[in-house]
């Protein structure tokens, strides 16, 4: 009788703990997503800090591996990392909760902004601000391309891929999906050939 | 059916934007401007500006923005769902493989082939935003008078500061906006 009672108590405690875990998962991903400016490169280290250092949910190695997986998967790195952590901590429902927490802030923010945008885009001052910001964004993109490109251009094949893809995309407006598929295949064939050569020697 | 079209477009964005961050920009441009004509190149440039200024991944921001402009709040939700659906499945499969085999070499190999392509794609999308900023809607022209001098100066100074001191991009973008407005009001 008492044993049954204890078991019931434990169930209730367990359910409470689960509920707290889901709430913590949602609050963590929601606040990280809502207040982190600057995209994947910024939010991922902050996630590591929250989940490893503060909440102690994962050790550093596992977190780093999850981040590598998130970066290897298509889609936004922040969303992918949230999904992986959520899944690891609380299964499919955890994945859902973490994804919701990550996606809701930009969904709400951009909905509000898009209302303003429609109302304000014809305002001359707003136009001047956006025009100035376009130049700033172009500089930010140029900076990223310069940093990433400097690493890639050292290899002949990579340099050729870069030149070809640029022409295909900029001048011929080829569907990006085809470009990605072709280049992914080139990468896969290269790995395969490399492995074959290593097997022979 | 507009909702299906939105979902499918952003599904492709989600499925093929590999490499995080700006890798989604060329795909979004391709789908939204070139293929479906939902936004003009000028509106797209504004969208990237807004996405860079607000928290959250560019793909989600764009899906919400385009979805709401084309088909209202439900459109925003549908487009966002489309953009995260592929990751949902692929991340789960990769996680299963990872916890089973602990080997991510082959995936890394494919990524090696994609990396230069992604850099070039980002460069291509960046160049069209640059042309937008320098010459407005008319596009590239050799006529020096049609060039927006303020934008050229802003771009050059921003790029120099970014390369030299590596500040957070958000400050660069905010300052560029302020200078752009000030220059307009003064002239």
Image (tube, coloured by chain):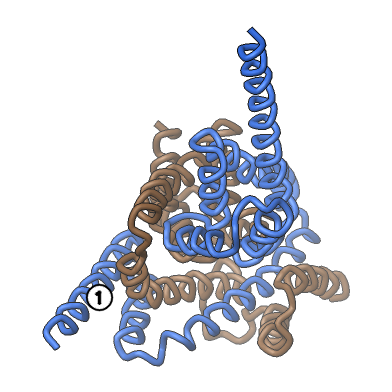
Chain colours: A blue, B brown
Where does the image place residue B133, in percent across and percent down from the top left? 63, 72
Residue at the (24%, 73%) spot, across then down: A186
In this rendering, the answer to whether A112 lies above or below B135 is above
Q: Is residue A59 visible?
A: yes
Looking at the rendering, which quadrant does residue B77 occupy? top right
Looking at the rendering, which quadrant does residue A89 occupy? top right
Depth check, front residue: A178 or A184: A184
Q: Quadrant of the C terminus of chain B?
A: bottom right
Seen in the image, is B26 located left or right of residue A64?
A: left
In this rendering, the answer to whether A47 lies above or below B127 is above
Residue at the (59%, 63%) spot, across then down: A60
Where does the image place residue B60, in percent across and percent down from the top left? 56, 49
In this rendering, the answer to whether A2 lies above or below B9 is above
Residue at the (62%, 79%) spot, across then down: B146
In this rendering, the answer to whether B140 lies above or below A14 is below
The residue marked by circle 1 belongs to what chain? A
Residue at the (48%, 45%) spot, across then down: B84
Q: Residues within 10 Å of mark 1 (few under 14, many from 20)?
A: many
Depth check, front residue: A151 or A61: A61
Circle 1 sits in a helix, a strand or a loop, which is it?
helix
Q: Quadrant of the N terminus of chain B?
A: top left
Q: Is residue B149 visible?
A: no
Question: According to the image, label 1 marks what residue?
Answer: A191
Depth check, front residue: A18 or A23: A18
Depth check, front residue: A159 or A77: A77
Give the residue at the far left of this rendering. A200
Where does the image place residue B169, in percent across and percent down from the top left? 70, 72
Seen in the image, is B169 located left or right of residue B74?
A: right
């Amino acid at each position: 009788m008492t044993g049954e009672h204890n078991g019931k108590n434990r169930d209730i405690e367990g359910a409470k703990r689960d509920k707290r875990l889901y709430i913590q998962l949602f609050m963590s991903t929601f606040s990280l997503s809502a207040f982190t400016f600057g995209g994947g490169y910024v939010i991922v280290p902050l996630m590591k800090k929250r989940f490893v250092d503060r909440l102690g949910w994962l050790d550093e190695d596992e977190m780093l591996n999850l981040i590598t997986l998130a970066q290897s998967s298509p889609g936004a790195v922040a969303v992918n990392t949230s999904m992986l952590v959520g899944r690891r901590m609380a299964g499919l429902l955890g994945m859902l909760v973490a994804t919701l927490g990550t996606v809701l802030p930009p969904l709400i923010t951009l909905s509000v902004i898009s209302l303003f945008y429609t109302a304000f885009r014809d305002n001359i001052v707003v136009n001047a601000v956006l025009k100035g910001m376009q130049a700033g964004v172009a500089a930010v993109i140029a900076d990223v391309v310069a940093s990433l490109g400097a690493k890639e251009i050292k290899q002949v094949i990579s340099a050729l891929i870069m030149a070809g893809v640029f022409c295909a995309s900029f001048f011929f407006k080829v569907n990006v999906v085809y470009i990605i598929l072709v280049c992914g295949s080139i990468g896969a064939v290269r790995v395969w050939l490399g492995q074959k050569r290593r097997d022979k020697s | 059916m507009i909702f299906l079209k939105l979902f499918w477009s952003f599904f492709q964005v989600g499925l093929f934007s590999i490499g995080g961050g700006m890798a989604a920009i060329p795909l979004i441009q391709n789908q939204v401007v070139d293929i479906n004509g939902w936004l003009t190149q000028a509106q797209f440039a504004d969208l990237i500006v807004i996405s860079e200024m607000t928290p959250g991944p560019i793909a989600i921001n764009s899906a919400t923005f385009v979805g709401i402009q084309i088909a209202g709040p439900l459109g925003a939700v549908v487009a966002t769902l489309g953009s995260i659906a592929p990751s949902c499945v692929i991340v789960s499969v990769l996680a299963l493989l990872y916890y089973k085999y602990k080997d991510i070499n082959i995936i890394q190999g494919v990524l090696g082939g994609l990396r230069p392509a992604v850099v070039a794609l980002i460069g291509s999308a960046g160049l069209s935003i640059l042309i937008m900023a320098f010459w407005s809607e008319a596009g590239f022209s050799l006529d020096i008078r049609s060039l927006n001098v303020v934008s050229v100066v802003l771009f050059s100074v921003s790029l120099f500061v970014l390369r030299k001191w590596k500040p957070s991009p958000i400050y660069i973008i905010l300052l560029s906006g302020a200078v752009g407005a000030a220059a307009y009001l003064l002239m």
